[in-house]
Amino acid sequence: MTGQRHQGRLAKLAKEFVRLPGIGQKTSQRLAFHMMKANKEDAMRLADAIRDVKEFVTFCVQCRNIAESELCEICQDPRRDRSKILVVEEPSTLHAIDQCRGYKGLYHVLMGSLSPLDGVGPSDIRAKELELRVKDGEVGEVIVATSPTIEGEATAIYLTKLLTPHGVTVSRIAYGIPVGMDIEYADEVTLTKSIEGRRELS
Amino acid sequence: MTGQRHQGRLAKLAKEFVRLPGIGQKTSQRLAFHMMKANKEDAMRLADAIRDVKEFVTFCVQCRNIAESELCEICQDPRRDRSKILVVEEPSTLHAIDQCRGYKGLYHVLMGSLSPLDGVGPSDIRAKELELRVKDGEVGEVIVATSPTIEGEATAIYLTKLLTPHGVTVSRIAYGIPVGMDIEYADEVTLTKSIEGRRELS
């Protein structure tokens, strides 16, 4: 029994918290004790919110954005520019980009990126689905916003080869010095990208 | 509608996560997306664990440790040394101390510490309840493990005055240099505490 002390429901909750990304042992215990002290309505709202997400939130059949019906709100929105598709690896990236409000076109989530070493080939990401959308004819430009990693670059190159034959422009978002960053603190790769991506001033 | 994009159930979940201590805006979104990707059983286990804690976990009527019945497992354990009560401010501190397994006595959670400036007086912490336990006669020593803060010190002094008339020994845990810490990096207060609490070597 001594060994089982505190191995009750609070310990079980801490064990569930520790499974979340970025939550360590100490934090999970702090969170469990917090739930213990929190008022019941607040705690239940969190439990219900988790349930609701698993119950009602799925992925858009067209772009794989998160959605609460067959098509996500962006794909449903008639004011969106249907001639542009911005391609990302994950729904969370789509979310981050769309919060900026600068882009008014559609999206396409690949659900990964090419990684031959990990056995992730073109058929494992949603490249075929993107090709089908491009073939539809309404699309004029595909903007590839994959990460500036080996996998992201390989994916960008692959998509360019796959899509340009269909008469569509394939572009890549700019990688360079972040706005507000002191150039001397930029890493080498970013600096190189930034120089490669230089634009003529008019 | 544009302004409401993504203000669905995933956003609601992120809003609940951000209410937790130490969880910022970015982390809460990451956690929400994680729940989205997690398999349903894992997500439901977290939701259920939260529910269970609010439903079944309460505080021990005797020591205010967390408990799933009237008395906590420690107060119920017949192998515990009933002549000692270790006093802490919060159940989480009790939990941390008991995990070390070095102490085999009982506990008493004050649910706070004296803080006259915040209007927290002796009747706002569980001091009276501790006195009643001491009056019971079985207790020989009360070990005060309140924080080394002004409030914790004031509480320790108050408890000493309250309990010694009942013929009980009141002690305070040692505060000093943490094991493994280089003395030159210790702060002044810790160093002072450590010198004050010196023990003769035999």
Image: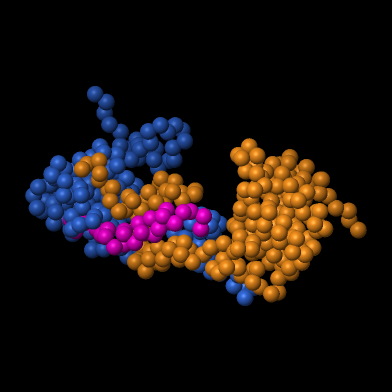
Chain colours: A orange, B blue
Seen from the viewer's position, the closer of residues A162 and A72 is A162
The reply to whether residue B181 is in sight is: yes
Q: Which residue is located at x 16 percent, y 43 percent?
A: B80
> Does the magenta run of residues contain A91?
no
Seen from the viewer's position, the closer of residues A13 and B104 is A13
Q: Which residue is located at x 78 percent, y 49 percent?
A: A161
The reply to whether residue B110 is in sight is: no
The x, y position of residue B121, in whole percent, is 27, 62
- In the image, is A113 to the left or to the right of B107? right
Up the image or down, B25 lies above or below A41; here it is above
Quarter occupied by the C terminus of chain B: top left
The x, y position of residue B116, in whole percent, is 32, 62
Q: Which residue is located at x 64 percent, y 72 percent?
A: A76
Magenta segment main secondary structure: helix
> Does the magenta run of residues contain B47?
yes
Quarter occupied by the N terminus of chain B: bottom right
- In the image, is B78 to the left or to the right of A137? left
- In the image, is A147 to the left or to the right of B186? right
The x, y position of residue B195, in whole percent, is 34, 35
Seen from the viewer's position, the closer of residues B50 and B164 is B50
Q: Which residues are magenta?
A: B36-63
Q: Which residue is located at x 77 percent, y 64 percent?
A: A137
Q: Residue furthest top?
A: B202
Q: Residue furthest left?
A: B137
Up the image or down, B191 lies above or below A183; here it is above
The x, y position of residue B11, in whole percent, is 53, 65
Q: How many marks?
A: 0
